[in-house]
Image (cartoon, rainbow, N blue to C red):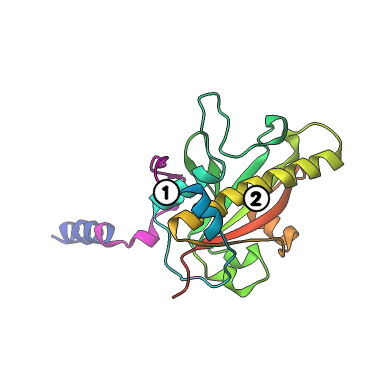
Amino acid sequence: MKLVLVVFAVAVLTVTLPLSAQTPSDITLPAPQQEGGMPLMQALKERKSTREYSTKKLSPQVLSNLLWAAFGISRTDGRRTAPSARNFQETDIYTVMQEGVYRYDAKENMLKLVAVGDYRKKTGAQAFVATAPLNLVYVADYSKMKGSKTDQELYSSADVGFISQNVYLFCASEGLATVVRGWVNRDECAKVLKLGEKNKIVLTQTVGYPKE
């Protein structure tokens, strides 16, 4: 009788564990929706920077659409929604959310787990980054590039500019708020992202719903 009670108690405990207690892992995103949205000229008119955010989280579908718009694969030859110098495709996008830090894998349409925990405040010096639902960190991988260091810095910075503008236009189209930022302690953030010597944080970008 005692053995039966123990087994029953373990079973109940397993069933009632909260979602937050489950082991974090990679996240498979839903297929991005590649149609619809606001007309381009209207999105350009609505595009703006915002520094006040609601704490409301983005759904997996919105997150998938956002990342595809930023730098997803848009052609069968593997080319992307934003240009990159000599098609180096050197920019990695890291998503920093309350649950943890992930790297966007465009080929697999997945978020690859990097670190568990809330590291949002490490992505910038402004107060709002710690409570906004999503901070994107744009990282250049110089190991994928050729040419001088000056060329690598120039081209990777331009490429991140293209990507961040895609995010601006997506947010304008979807009623989201965003701002691209350069004020970040890159050394501290690089430790959280577990970056190597060939990786450089170029810019960060906050995304969320506007504060009402």
Q: Any mark on residue 138, and which?
A: 2
Is residue 164 visible to the viewer in this orientation of the structure? yes
Q: Which residue is rendered at x = 52% and y = 67% of the image?
A: 132
Along the line of sight, the residue nearer the viewer: 2 or 123: 123
Single out the residue that lies furthest toward the top. 77
Along the line of sight, the residue nearer the viewer: 166 or 124: 166
**Residue at mark 1 to residue at mark 2: CA–CA distance:** 24 Å
Q: Nearer the viewer, mark 1 or mark 2?
A: 1
209, above or below 127, in the image: above
Report x, y in % for residue 8. Answer: 18, 58
- What amino acid is found at the position of numbered circle 1 in the picture? Gly
Q: Which residue is rendered at x = 28% and y = 57% of the image?
A: 14
Q: Please give the range of residues in magenta.
A: 15-38
Q: Residue 16's image quarter?
A: bottom left
The quarter in which the C terminus is drawn is bottom left
State the residue position of label 1. 37
